[in-house]
Amino acid sequence: MEIKYAALIGLGAMGSFFAPRMEAYLGREHFQVIAAGKRKERLEQQGITVNGVNYKFSVRTPEEEGPKADLVIMAMKDMGLAQAIEDIRNLVGKDTQILCVMNGIDSEEKVAAAYGWEHVLYSFMRMSIVMKDGVADFDPHWGTVHFGEARNEVLSPRVAAIKTFFEACDIPYVIDGDMKHGLWFKYMCNVGENMTCALLGIPFGAFRTSDSANEIRRGAMREVMAIANRLGVDLNESDIETQEETLKHVPYRNKPSTLQDLENGKKTEVELFAGTVLRLGKELGVPTPISYMFYHGIRVCEEKNAGEFCVEDK
C-alpha cells in the first residue's frame, strides 16, 4: 500500500496540523479538503493562515465525483461526526484507510460501523493549537499524531504505509503499542484539563501555579480512570503523573478547545467530555461529581452566550 492521494475533512485547528505538509508532499492535485456550502466558499476565497502563511487548498464537495482516497483524515469536532461520515462516502474505496483524530473514545467505532474495521485505524492527537478566525500559530514539531491498530507489537502493512507517508510529509507521529490505552489516556487528560479550563476561564498555564486548579483537574481524571478500569483499560496514578510533566511544556497562554469555543460564542464538546463521563459513570456505578459540575456549569455558560439571561423581568 502507498499513499498517493489523500483528503482531509475538518480544516480547523487539528486539520491545520496536517494540511500544509500533506499538500507540500503530495501536490495540489493529489490532496483535497472536503467541504460544502459557505464553508467551501470561505476556504476557497479566504483560505486559512498557518504560522503566517496563507493556504488556499483544493476543495472538493462531498457529492463531487473523483478519485478514491488512499487516506482520509477526519479532524472535525464531535458535533460534526455523523455528517462527516456521510460526507466522505465518495472517497472511500476498497483500500482506503481512515484516521479519525478527533477527541473522544468511540469515534472509531462509529466510523467502522459505516465502513468496516478494514478501513479504520485508531488515532488521536497530542497537540495544543489555538485557532481563531482561520489563523493558527503553533510549533509544527511540538505535537504528534498517534495512530495504529489496537495493538502494534508488529506493524501491519497499512500502519507501515501511513508511517512512511507521515515521515515523507514531516508529520510527527507515535505508534502506541496499546492504542486503546492511549485513547483513554488522552480522554482522561482532556476531561481534566479541557473541562477545568473551560469552567474556570483559565489557560493551561494556570496548572503550573494553582494548587486548587490542579486538585479539580486530578479529581476529574480519577473519575475517568475509575470508569476505564471498570471497562478493562489499565489507567492508573502513574498515567496522571506522566501528564504532570507534559503540562509544564504547554505554552502558558494556550487555551483548550472548549474554552476557545466558549470565548467565541460557539457550542462546545461538553457532551463528548463530561456528558460521556456522566453516562458511563451511571451505567457502571462510578460516582462522577466533578464531571457533574463540569457538565451543568458549562451548559450554563453556553446558555449565557446564547443570551438567555439578558431579558429583564421576564
Image (spheres, rainbow, N blue to C red):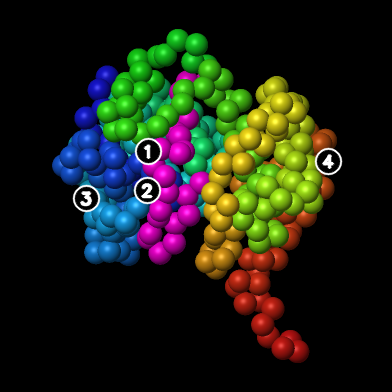
Name the residue that disc number 1 marks: 73
Alpha-carbon distance for marks 4 and 1? Answer: 35 Å
Q: Quadrant of the N terminus?
A: top left
Mark 2 vs mark 4, foreground winner is 2
Is 134 inside the magenta-drawn segment?
yes
Mark 3 vs mark 2, foreground winner is 2
Circle 4: element type: loop
Circle 1: element type: strand
Q: Earlier in the sequence, mark 4 or mark 1?
A: 1
User: Which residue is rendered at x = 56% and y = 66% of the image?
Assistant: 263
Three-letter residue code for mark 1 = Ile
Residue 205 percent coordinates (x, y): 63, 51
User: Which residue is rendered at x = 49% and y = 42% of the image?
Assistant: 127
Three-letter residue code for mark 3 = Ser
- The tag on residue 58 is 3
Name the residue that disc number 4 marks: 287
Does 156 appear above or below 196? above
Mark 1 vs mark 2, foreground winner is 2
Alpha-carbon distance for marks 2 and 4? Answer: 38 Å
- The tag on residue 16 is 2
Is 239 inside the magenta-drawn segment?
no
Three-letter residue code for mark 4 = Pro
Are circles 4 and 1 on residues that touch, CB within 8 Å? no
What residue range appears in magenta?
A: 128-150
Three-letter residue code for mark 2 = Ser
Q: Earlier in the sequence, mark 2 or mark 4?
A: 2
Are circles 3 and 2 on residues that touch, CB within 8 Å? no
